[in-house]
């Protein structure tokens, strides 16, 4: 009962933030033609003021020490107001916690106070490349990152490019996966580096013009003889992939939470709409076929949420961790979201097709996570490998 009350309080807390900060701006920002102009520093700074950026960090670094389940509730509620906003904060929360979990004491003391004290400090992680997307989800012999790091005196020299990177053009701090050992695949010969915006040889390229999730900027990261000192290697050389495997246990589930928030919004709009829209002499909700559809939508949401929370609880050490939990929660949530949002569109009839009623934004956002954080079919194959083992 106590956990339920805490989650209810979290929902109220984020609901107030959404109503005050996110919802009044989301539609306007989403409609900007220039994808870079869809982003809002005002929202980031307002989120920092209530502790969102440092949510999962320990008290030693100014954080609230949220566990994975509580964080999933926060991320879902942010997604209820806007998917892009949820992604901006989810990425930052996740990656900052990885730095605290993996970094040496010297690295943490050097970086995290600067991160904590800058209300605009966001995190990004550079993994995906034009030729490497599903390859890092289901590694196979010979698949290596095209971004390479070569040994130099006192450190490494990076060359290559990443793309589709959330917060790519907005972050202050980055984790970057690069190939450091020739002749090995990316799961065995890559290293994780910490890089700061403005480092010589590091620039950002185009901001991708996305169908949905527009309040989060995704961009290219370009490295041209970018020097990174040995002090900024995160973890061990050649073991970068282990960081992804061991220290992102709830990443997939948090991605599911973001997209679940979109479905929550579609369901909420549908209940409100069917209560006030009268057809056949009575509100739509009083028609059995409509009520059944709403019931099905709620069931889909509850099932996906339960899966997300079970996976997050296992990542917190409560219950048994199954490696398929690193793939299935996002699949389940994104499929549920797509189903719920398209059902909501139908419940709104012709009005749902009009931009004025907000449903088209939810539809565009719902499409994002059929691919984002891993294409669903690649994640199925990832899980299948565990089942086959």
Image (cartoon, rainbow, N blue to C red):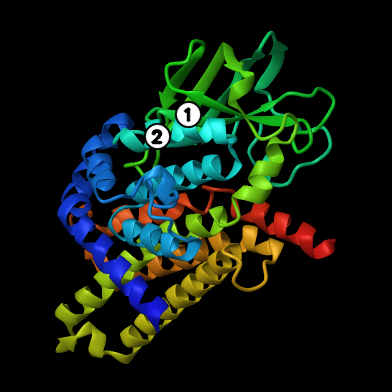
Q: For mark 2, does the 10 Å Cα neighbourhood hold few (<14), some (14 to 19), or many (20 or more) residues?
A: few
The residue under the point 38% across, 46% down is 54
Indicate which disc residue 113 carries: 2
x and y percent of residue 108 in the render?
Answer: 51, 35
In the foreground, 259 or 68 = 68
* Quarter of the view holding residue 219: top left
x and y percent of residue 174 in the render?
Answer: 50, 30
* Quarter of the view holding residue 184: top right
Please determine whether, in this image, residue 51 is positioned above or below residue 203.
Answer: below
Please determine whether, in this image, residue 152 is positioned above or below residue 330.
Answer: above
Evaluate whether residue 357 shows in this view: no
Quarter holding the C terminus? bottom right
Indicate which disc residue 349 carries: none
Q: For mark 1, does the 10 Å Cα neighbourhood hold few (<14), some (14 to 19), or many (20 or more) residues?
A: few
Q: Are the two marked residues, 1 and 2, in contact with CB atoms closer than 8 angstroms? A: yes
The residue under the point 77% across, 60% down is 386
Q: Secondary structure at mark 2?
A: helix
Please determine whether, in this image, residue 59 is positioned above or below residue 184.
Answer: below
Alpha-carbon span between mark 1 and mark 2 = 7 Å
The residue under the point 40% across, 84% down is 1
In the foreground, 325 or 272 = 325
* Quarter of the view holding residue 179: top right
x and y percent of residue 189 in the render?
Answer: 77, 31
Left or right: residue 317 versus residue 89 is right
Q: Secondary structure at mark 1?
A: helix
Left or right: residue 22 versus residue 223 is left
The residue under the point 65% across, 23% down is 147
In the foreground, 321 or 142 = 321
Q: Which residue is mark 1?
A: 110
Evaluate whether residue 219 shows in this view: yes
x and y percent of residue 102 in the render?
Answer: 60, 41
């Amino acid at each position: 009962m106590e956990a339920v009350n805490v989650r209810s309080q979290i929902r109220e807390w984020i609901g107030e933030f959404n109503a005050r900060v996110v919802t009044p701006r989301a539609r306007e920002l989403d409609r900007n033609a220039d994808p870079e102009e869809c982003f809002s520093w005002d929202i980031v700074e307002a989120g920092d003021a209530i502790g969102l950026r440092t949510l999962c960090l320990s008290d030693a670094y100014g954080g609230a020490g949220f566990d994975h389940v509580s964080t999933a509730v926060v991320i879902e509620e942010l997604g209820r107001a806007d998917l892009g906003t949820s992604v901006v904060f989810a990425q930052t929360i996740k990656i900052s916690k990885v730095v605290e979990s993996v970094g040496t004491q010297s690295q943490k003391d050097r970086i995290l106070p600067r991160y904590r004290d800058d209300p605009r400090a966001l995190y990004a992680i550079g993994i995906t490349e034009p030729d490497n997307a599903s390859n890092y989800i289901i590694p196979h012999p010979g698949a290596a990152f095209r971004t390479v790091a070569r040994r130099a005196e006192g450190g490494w020299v990076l060359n290559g490019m990443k793309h589709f990177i959330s917060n790519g053009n907005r972050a202050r701090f980055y984790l970057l996966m690069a190939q450091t050992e020739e002749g090995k695949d990316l799961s065995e010969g890559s290293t994780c580096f910490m890089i700061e915006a403005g480092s010589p040889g590091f620039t950002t390229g185009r901001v991708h013009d996305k169908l949905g999730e527009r309040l989060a900027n995704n961009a290219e990261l370009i490295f041209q003889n970018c020097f990174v000192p040995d002090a900024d290697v995160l973890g061990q050389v050649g073991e970068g992939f282990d960081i992804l495997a061991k220290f992102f246990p709830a990443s997939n589930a948090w991605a599911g939470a973001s997209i679940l928030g979109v479905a929550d919004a579609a369901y909420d709009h549908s209940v409100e709409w069917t209560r006030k829209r009268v057809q056949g002499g009575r509100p739509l909700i009083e028609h059995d076929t409509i009520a059944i559809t709403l019931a099905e939508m709620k069931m889909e949401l509850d099932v996906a949420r339960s899966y997300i929370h079970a996976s997050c609880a296992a990542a917190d050490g409560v219950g048994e961790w199954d490696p398929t939990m690193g793939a299935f929660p996002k699949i389940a949530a994104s499929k549920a979201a797509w189903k719920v949002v398209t059902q909501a569109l139908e419940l709104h009839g012709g009005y749902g097709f009009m931009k004025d009623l907000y449903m088209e934004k939810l539809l565009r956002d719902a499409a994002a996570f059929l691919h984002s954080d891993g294409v669903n079919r690649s994640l199925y194959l990832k899980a299948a490998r565990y089942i086959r083992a």
